[in-house]
Image (spheres, rainbow, N blue to C red):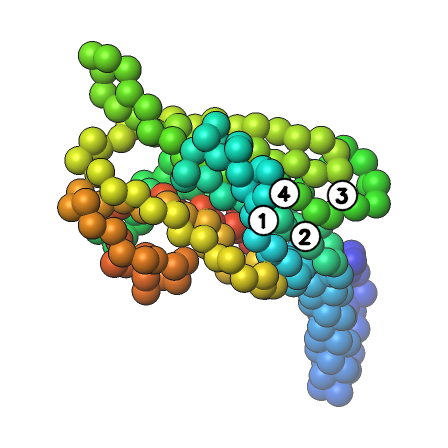
Amino acid sequence: MAVIFNFSNMIAYFNGGSKLRLKACILIVFMILTGCFAGTKEQISPETDSTSSKIEFTPVDLFQGDAAKFKLFLGPMTGAFKLKYEGNKPNVSLDIDIWKNGQKVDSAGSIGDLFYSSNEQKGSNEVELIISVDTESIEGQKEFSKIKVNTTSHSGSSLSTITIPWDKKLTAHGLIQDMRPRSFTIDQPVHVFGMHATSTNKIHTADLSTESLRKTEWALVFTLLLDEEDRE
């Protein structure tokens, strides 16, 4: 909203010497500026705010029934879940963070725009993720861990692979999964999957709460969050 003042006319108006006129001008200017700020507020709080979008989380049993035969190929550190949003499309990323001694210390990588769709086809508001973490070693080299994330939606599928160094002292492994359907808004980061390991050959049951993650010796934590531009 553009506001243009004719200063020469205002000066002439003030020269009339009337305090009443001065007060009237100040009141008019105040009302105009108030209208400008009100218009600005309407523009920065539109219905397209993706932070209020509701996301439904549904766990998937990959190895149910005959599908159990695929566990040999995918490995035991594998899990899957579906995400479906209601409302405006959120630009959501899946961050993969490394935790040590109960604290986040590094990032292994990120998968961006999980709900990407090349068109507006019906059903494109849902995506299925399969996550697999496998440790590999090459003779004469250090061990490493390969993280695979496959996303499947109405538009197709995409496989991302991330490799990180692996500490061979970590000998016991366990998945951290939420097997209950749930829903949430994405105004704050949400942990949706994880894997943890210890160097003691003794592993404890863990969940995705921050309190539980603080008790882990080493963990990979997969977290949903809005891209920075959508959080502003």
> Horizontal and vertical percent for residue 199?
17, 43
Alpha carbon distance from label 3 to label 2: 9 Å
Residue at 66 percent of width and 30 percent of height: 157
Q: Nearer the viewer, residue 190 or 173?
A: 173
The residue that mark 2 highlights is: 84
**Amino acid type, residue under disc 2 in the picture:** Lys
Location of residue 168 (image quadrant): top left
**Of callouts 1 and 3, which one flags the residue occurring earlier in the amino acid sequence?**
1
Marks 4/1 in contact by CB < 8 Å: the verdict is yes
- Mark 3 Cα-neighbour bin, 10 Å: few <14, some 14–19, many ≥20: some
**Amino acid type, residue under disc 4 in the picture:** Glu
- Mark 1 Cα-neighbour bin, 10 Å: few <14, some 14–19, many ≥20: some
The secondary structure type at the circle numbered 4 is: strand
- Mark 2 Cα-neighbour bin, 10 Å: few <14, some 14–19, many ≥20: some
The residue that mark 1 highlights is: 60
User: Is residue 196 among the parts visible in the rendering?
Assistant: yes
Alpha carbon distance from label 2 to label 4: 9 Å
Question: From what the image shows, is residue 105 above or below residue 135?
Answer: below
The secondary structure type at the circle numbered 2 is: strand
Alpha carbon distance from label 4 to label 3: 11 Å
User: Is residue 227 among the parts visible in the rendering?
Assistant: no
Question: From what the image shows, is residue 147 above or below residue 20?
Answer: above
